[in-house]
């Protein structure tokens, strides 16, 4: 199955991130991807440029970097991206050097509409087409998104009391 440049469904368009959008869209989406328990104060936005998170977005657009966005009426409502970190960088969802790590986020006003499911499904297809055997991510156990990942076929491969690393096996 080949993924067309744009996939239209009603008012939502799932499309690749444009190179010129990366510097603005990815920091915002990485910030939106940060999970907070109810009642926790907001995290400072600058955290995405710190050493523990910046590796997920810095210099995005290299080989093995893939990103799809959901655009609604000209607004980027969400994004899903995957990258092989390499260079000794091991992210929160690290499994091995051949497995890209995935991140997904939606702006709060667009959550609960099935957009995240569509983004994930399209990204899993895209990564399969590129020949990856699997993709991983890290998720807080209290995050409702963990249910979505399980529904889409992810399995936990490593857990702590709060977080787990999940892997999607891809049909290559």
Image (cartoon, rainbow, N blue to C red):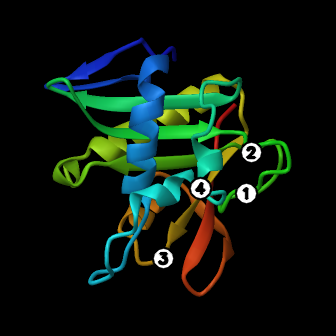
Q: Residue at x 70, y 31 (%)?
A: 172
Distance (Cα) linking label 1 and label 3: 17 Å
Q: Mark number for residue 53?
A: 4
| Residue 61 appears in view | yes
Marks 2 and 4: which is nearer the front? 4
Residue 18 visible in the shown view: no
Residue 49: image x %, image y %?
Answer: 55, 51
Q: Residue at the spot x=16%, y=51% of the render?
A: 109
| Mark closer to the chain start, 1 or 3 | 1
Q: Earlier in the sequence, mark 2 or mark 4?
A: 4
First in sequence, mark 4 or 1: give its number.
4
Q: What is the number of the mark on residue 94?
A: 1
Residue 57 located left or right of residue 22: right
**Dots 4 and 3: beta carbons under 8 Å?**
no
Q: CA distance from mark 4 to mark 1?
A: 13 Å
Task: Give the residue drawn at x 65%, y 38%.
Answer: 83
Image-based side of 123 in relation to 156, left or right = left
Dots 4 and 1: beta carbons under 8 Å? no
> Label 4 crowding class (10 Å Cα cut-off): few <14, some 14-19, many 20+?
some
Contact check, label 2 and label 1, Cβ < 8 Å: yes
Viewer-side residue, 26 vs 168: 26
Instruction: Give the labeled residue for mark 3.
Output: 141
Look at 45% across and 39% down and name the residue there: 26
Whether residue 159 is situated above or below residue 93 in the rendered picture: below
The disc placed on residue 99 is 2
Spatial distance from mark 2 to mark 4, Cα to Cα?
18 Å
Q: Residue furthest bottom?
A: 161
> Closer to the observer: label 2 or label 1?
1
Earlier in the chain: of badge 2 and badge 3, it is: 2
Q: Secondary structure at mark 1?
A: loop
């Amino acid at each position: 199955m080949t993924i067309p440049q744009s996939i239209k469904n009603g008012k939502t368009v799932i499309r690749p991130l444009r190179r010129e959008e990366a510097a603005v869209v990815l920091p915002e989406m990485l910030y939106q991807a940060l999970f907070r328990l109810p009642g926790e104060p907001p995290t400072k936005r600058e955290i995405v440029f710190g050493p523990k998170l910046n590796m997920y977005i810095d210099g995005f657009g290299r080989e093995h970097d893939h990103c799809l966005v959901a655009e609604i009426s000209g607004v980027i409502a969400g994004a899903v991206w995957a990258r092989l970190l390499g260079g000794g960088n091991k992210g929160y969802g690290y499994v091995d050097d051949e497995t890209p790590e995935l991140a997904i986020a939606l702006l709060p006003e667009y959550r609960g509409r099935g957009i995240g499911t569509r983004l994930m499904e399209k990204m899993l297809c895209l990564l399969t087409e590129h020949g990856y055997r699997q993709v991983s991510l890290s998720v807080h156990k209290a995050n409702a998104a963990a249910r979505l990942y399980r529904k889409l076929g992810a399995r936990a491969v490593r857990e702590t009391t709060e977080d787990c690393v999940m892997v999607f096996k891809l049909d290559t």
